[in-house]
Structure formats: C-alpha cells, structure tokens
Amino acid sequence: MEKINELTSENIVQQNIERLKEIFPTAFSEGKLVVEELQALVGEYIQKDKEFYQMNWAGKTEAQREANKVSTGTLRPCKEESKDWDSTGNIFIEGDNLEVLKLLQKSYSNKIKMIYIDPPYNTGKDFVYKDNYKDNLNNYLELTGQKDEEGKKLSTNTDSDGRYHSNWLNMMYPRLKLARNLMKDDGVIFISIDNNELYNLKRICDEIFGEENFIECITWNKRIPKNDKGIGSIHENILLYAKNYTTEMQFLMLKDGLDDIDELVAKLKNKNVDLIEAEKEIKKLYRQKGYDRGITLYNSLDYNYRLWGKINMSWPNSNTFGPDYDVFHPVTKKKVKVPDRGWRWKLETFNTAAKIVDGQYTDIINLPDGSYLCGKIWFSKDENTQPSSVNYLDDVNYFLLRSILSLKSDGGIEVESIFEGKSFFSYPKPTQLLKTLIRSFKSELILDFFAGSGTTAHAVMGLNAEDGGNRKCISVQLPEQTEKNSEAFKAGYNWITEISKERIRRAGDLIKQEIKEKNEIENLDTGFRVFKLDSSNIQAWDTSVDKFEGQLDMFAENNGDHIKSNRTEEDVLFEILLKYGLELTLPIEEKVVGDCKIYNIGFGSMYICLSDQIKTDVATAIGEWHKESSDSNPSVIFKDSGFAKDADKTNTVQTLRQVGIENVKSI
C-alpha cells in the first residue's frame, strides 16, 4: 500500500514541463529540458533582439515565480456556517485568494466558464493584499490572527510609496495567472477597474491572456457622479478577456425595461384600449424612459396586444446585390416597390414568412391603420411602399452585450435593504450589473475571487430564479477585520466575510420567498458550502536539529499518527479531494462498519476511511459498495495508523483486489 506523505497543491511548473514533453519530446534528455534543442525546434519564433516590447516593473520576476509555487495549505470544511450543505453546488471560501487559487488548480482546472472580479482599485485608500513570497500561507495565518495577536493590521498602498503601481501589479499578476488555468478553453473573465490602474491592468492582461484574446473594455455608466477631481466621473471600466477568443462567442443581455412594458401592455389589454390609442401610450412610455432602439423599434400591437416591429427587407451589403424577384401586394395584387439592391431573403424564405401557398396569400390581417399583416410580413395599404418583415418583441428579448452599460441600480441600497437599512460596504456593485454580465452563461460555474459583499453569489441566485438557469458560484474572500467604529462592528460582525455570508443567506431566503409567492421554480439552489484556508492537516516533518526532539514528542502524543490532533476526519477528507483533483461539492455518502466510518465520494469514484482499528470487514463493505457503482477504477485511501497490525493492512489490500480495486493508498 503506497503511502501519501505530503499533500500540496498542483505543481504548475511540473505540469508545464509535462506539456512540453508531449509537444517537444526530443527537447528532453534524461528528464531534463535541453534549451538549445528547444530553440532549434521553434526556429524563427525566438525573440533574439535584446530590446523588445514588454512591460516590466519592480518585483515582476518574483510575482511570476509566486504563480508557480505550490501551496502547503488546505481548505477546511465549516458545516456550521454553511447553508444546505448536502445539496448545494455553491462554495464560499475564506482565505487569501492567492493561496486559494493554488489549492483549486487541480480540482477546477479548465472548469470555470466565467470569472468576475472587482479587485482593489489602488486609490491610495483601498486594502491591498500584502503578499509574502517567502511564506504566503504563514503570512495569511498571522494577518488573520490564526497564529498570534500581532500583525493583524492590513495594508494600504499610498502613492507616497515609491512602488505604488508596482505593489498593485505584484498583487494582481500571480492571481490572474492562476485564474487563467481554471478557465475553460472558451471561458472568459470580466475585471472591474477605474482609471487609476486601467492602463497597467490592460497591459498585464495582454501578457497573461494574450492581446488576441482581448474582447472589449466595457464602460459602466453608473449615472451617479463622483466629483473628486473637479469633474463628475460617472463611469467605471470592465475589461473582458477570453482564454481563447473565437468570433462565435456571443454575449447577450436582456433588453432594459421589459417589465415596465409588459405591465403597461397588460393594463391596456385588460381595459380593452383601442389599438391605435394603446400604441400611443406605448410610444409615450418609450420617450419617458429613453429606451434603446432595440426596444423602441417594437411600437405596434396586433389584435392580441402583442408588440411587434418592422425590419427593413433591403439587401444589407452596399457592395453586392441580393435576390431579385417580384412581390405582389396581397390586396391590390400589383407589384410592390423592389429595393434598389435586391431583397434580403430568398424567394422561398419570403413565401414561407408571408404564408404564400401556390402563389396565394393564405392569412391576411387588416390592421387599424389600413395596412396588412400576412404571416410575418407587413404591407402598406397599397403597393407603393416596400414591405417589411415582422419581429415580435417577446421573440427577441435579448441583444448583444453593449460596450456601454447604463444601469441606475445602487448596490449600496440593495445591501441596506437586506440588513434593515444598515450600510456595511462602500460602493458594492449592484446585482443588476452582475446579472447583465452573467446572463449568457446559463448552466455554468462562475468564480469571483474578490467576492467582497457577495454580489456575484447574490446575482447568480437571482438570475437562476429569473430564467431557470443552473449556474453555480465559487466565492473567495479574505476575512478582513471590520473597523471598531464601523456599523458592521457595532452590529456584531467582526469580519467582512461574516457579512458576506449573511448577505448571501438572507438574499437566498428573499429570492425563495418571492418565487414561492409566484409558484415558480421549486428547486432553486440558494445554499453554499463554507471552507476556510488553513495549514495542512498533515504534520510536516522538520529535519532541523532544534526541532527534532519536539517533533518526536508530538509524534508520540499522536500515537504515531502524523495527522494533526486538532483536525477532524472531514478536514482530512477534503484535503484528499483537493490532492486528487475532485470538486468540493461532490456528493458524499457515509457508511458505518463496526467502529469505522467509510466515505463514498462522487458515487463511487473514491472511498476513504480515516478511522482506527481498520479490519477486512471495511474492505468487504467497500467492495459491496463498489459493485453498485459504474466507476471501474476507484481510489481507496486509509489512514496508515488506522491498522492495528500489518496483517490487517495486507489482508485489506488483498480483499479489495479480489473485487477489482487496485488503487489503494494510505495517508
């Protein structure tokens, strides 16, 4: 039985070496990379000039190295702070996001469809994650008070510091590098930023994601001026990058104002208002609200009070010509005006849309203004006006995501409404903004590793309730302490993460109450599993002379067990899942055999037993469970010190082999 002695995060350098071996096997000799051979293979693509276009800053090399370092930490489950632990697919992780991103590398590599982050803007006042490249995990534990009472004050980055921009870039670079690994091949990332670091952020994103994968710099028009430089600044920026951009990518947004329009149309229909008068009311609403052309185009009503609009049928390309054929007016029977460059559609397509069968119109509807509807083609009262195709508003609720987003909703008011009018966050993003960005990804995994107030998780739940989606969210947030004179501290919240989790809990309850009242979606996921960053559950062996005797004492106190005495079986279980690249929300079943507990992970992909006094009856029970599973090659992991005798260990392995289970290890 092979023993697992150390559990660390994915070794990204080793992973990259293995990829190079697959692509350039001849560039390796005895397991080592031969740089000269690699250079010969890539030939003209080598940059030979000493001077070339690149971005450098103080600390960049260390930031690059940091992205490649492994983490010796783990994520410990916290069921008591979770909601719907057994059924949820959402996750909330407390911890420094640099370490957390490292720990997620194996379990979530190429699984995240969309990332949204709202990092510190580097205004000179915002909190900046103060990384310690020598031992970032230990640094995190000290800052959050898990090791001692010193060093809890988190850092700001003032412009009096000679490395003002460099410090911010060093914080962002490794996190973005690690985040890219988690993205699906067709995944995307949205990054909110103001003008302080927009230029620098764009440069490092070009380097990490590739200039060819830049999609857009979206302008978010907040409509709330921030007058701090003698000018009313009413916008922020959102950089959008893809991991591998293709022209097939589409980002859709729901047309603004549909609820107001539906409400007005329903009122007009209930009162049986004359169609011409009703259309005037519709146009009046459009003028008042200043809606986009994608809304105002739809200003006509059919007899069912269904809004429709006319679409020009002329050939759209000014350099070419479209199909040329005769169209006859359905009533006058005369030829209608033909567009100068031909029709947009082929004759067969036109006939189908106009419901023409054997040259005859089969469905002619007289409209109140004297014009006609034939299927989905509109004709004027006579042949002198070119006909148009017809689209209904409820068929085209979406249009392409705009590069300028104008959203009025206030994220601060949203949070206050959840917490009885108390203001706990400065300038939280509104859920309407996040819903707009997320809407295109209906059944995907979303990541926010600067989770802040929990807006992304809130938006995911709300959007799933609106459109029946099955999005899941991973939120990561540093447990920053609240100020002692703040509203949050006075309300009993000592850490920002406590507020974030409570916001998600309350928001989920409110959303469920709303859909319950409307008798809508029953199985909406408003839960989340909480995990907290900590040091590994496995006690590392320190070979230094001054630590040797103390470690022997510790080893004796633990009865030879190198699992830390203050850690639970579930702590170790989830560390194993991370080691093996399994997702943290996989279903886990439990079975008790004698005094031992067995965990079945992911319907039989792995079995774990961390109990003491393990005997062959445990292996027999695992074998029976395995027969019910479709997984032909599961892993089985035991606690090494859980076997009282070597014979028990040997017999357990043999029993498992008899049912076809070969991958057996101990920890």
Image (spheres, grey):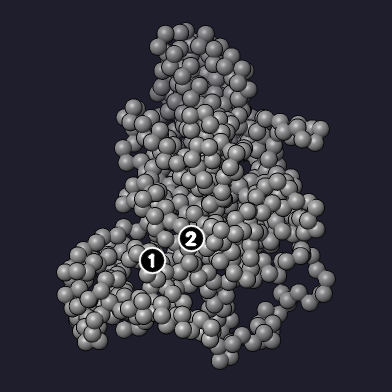
Q: Classify residue 598 by image quadrant.
A: bottom left
Element type at marker 1?
A: loop
How far from the left and from the top, in percent, is residue 373? 48, 20
Q: Is residue 34 above or below residue 631?
A: below
Which of the pair 37/278 is nearer the observer? 37
The residues bearing labels 2 and 1 have C-alpha atoms spaced at a distance of 15 Å
Using residue 190 as the reference point, say whether residue 261 is left or right of it.
left
Neighbours of disc 2 within 10 Å: few (<14), some (14-19), many (20+): many
Which of the pair 10/36 is nearer the observer? 10
Residue shown at the point (44%, 13%) measured from the top left = 267
Residue type at mark 2: give it.
Leu
How far from the left and from the top, in percent, is residue 228? 77, 35
Q: Which residue is mark 1?
A: 566
Q: Is residue 256 above or below residue 655?
A: above
Q: Which residue is mark 2?
A: 533
The residue sitting at the bottom extreme is 30
How far from the left and from the top, in percent, is residue 71? 53, 69
Residue type at mark 1: give it.
Asn
